Image (cartoon, grey):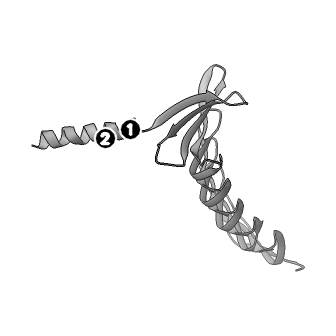
Amino acid sequence: MRLFSLLVLILFSFCGFAQYQFSTFVDDFGNIIQEKTHPDSSLKYIETFEIIKGIKLKIFEGRVDQNKQYQGWWRFFDSQENLLSVGLFKNNLKYGYWKFYHPNGELESHGFFVNDKKEGWWEFYNPEGMLVKKGHYKDNLEQGFWHFYKKGSINKEGFYTFGKPTKTWRFYNTEGELIRVEGFLD
């Protein structure tokens, strides 16, 4: 009885895959586009490939709606197929949580977007994976208190208002000791 149930499950799984329609074409830029569409969905899953020195390389993948706007999760790759970024789109605009990567695969930054603009808490890392800076964005501009690091230690910290340094900033030596305080006009 178990074997029969397993065979029925496998058969229905394959029938479900058979509903997808696949198409491949070349766009105006010479990229190879592979689409997978389910007849009950208004979204298409696409993978885009570029031919570089005779090698087919994936450059991005995600979903588009009937108006060819990016929707949902997307992934972008460099010319060696290393992951560059992953995140959400809503009506062709970055929206929600995103991660960006250095070419060596280490995390470069992560944070949130609202209508294609950085918003809220963000962190940035160097190619060795060490924290470089962290703080808040408001409407794609640094806003509020920010921390900057050098070789894993606090280097400086201070306030931003609409992307410009304001108020009091503190500077530290490599041992994390306060060495200087500067003020900026608001």
Q: 30 or 69, which lies in front?
A: 69
Give the CA distance from mark 1 to mark 2.
7 Å
**Callout 2: helix, strand or loop?**
helix
Q: 132 or 109, which lies in front?
A: 109
Image marks 1 and 2: residues in contact by CB distance under 8 Å: yes
**In the rendered image, which residue does mark 2 sit on?**
13
Q: Quadrant of the C terminus?
A: bottom right
Q: Position of residue 68 (x, y in %)?
A: 65, 46
**In the rendered image, which residue does mark 1 sit on?**
17
Q: Position of residue 5 (x, y in %)?
A: 17, 43
Mark 2, residues whose alpha carbon is within 10 Å: few (<14), some, or many (≥20)?
few
Up/down of 123 relative to 71, above or below:
below
Q: Quadrant of residue 72?
A: bottom right
Up/down of 131 relative to 17, above or below:
below
Q: Quadrant of the N terminus?
A: top left
Up/down of 35 relative to 134, above or below:
above
Q: Residue at x 41, y 38 (%)?
A: 19
Mark 1, residues whose alpha carbon is within 10 Å: few (<14), some, or many (≥20)?
few
Up/down of 1 relative to 87, above or below:
above
Amino acid carrying mark 2 in the image: Ser
Q: Position of residue 116 (x, y in %)?
A: 71, 59
The answer to whether residue 105 of the structure is visible from this angle is: no
Amino acid carrying mark 1 in the image: Phe
Q: Residue at x 63, y 62 (%)?
A: 111
**Callout 1: helix, strand or loop?**
helix
Q: Quadrant of residue 137?
A: bottom right
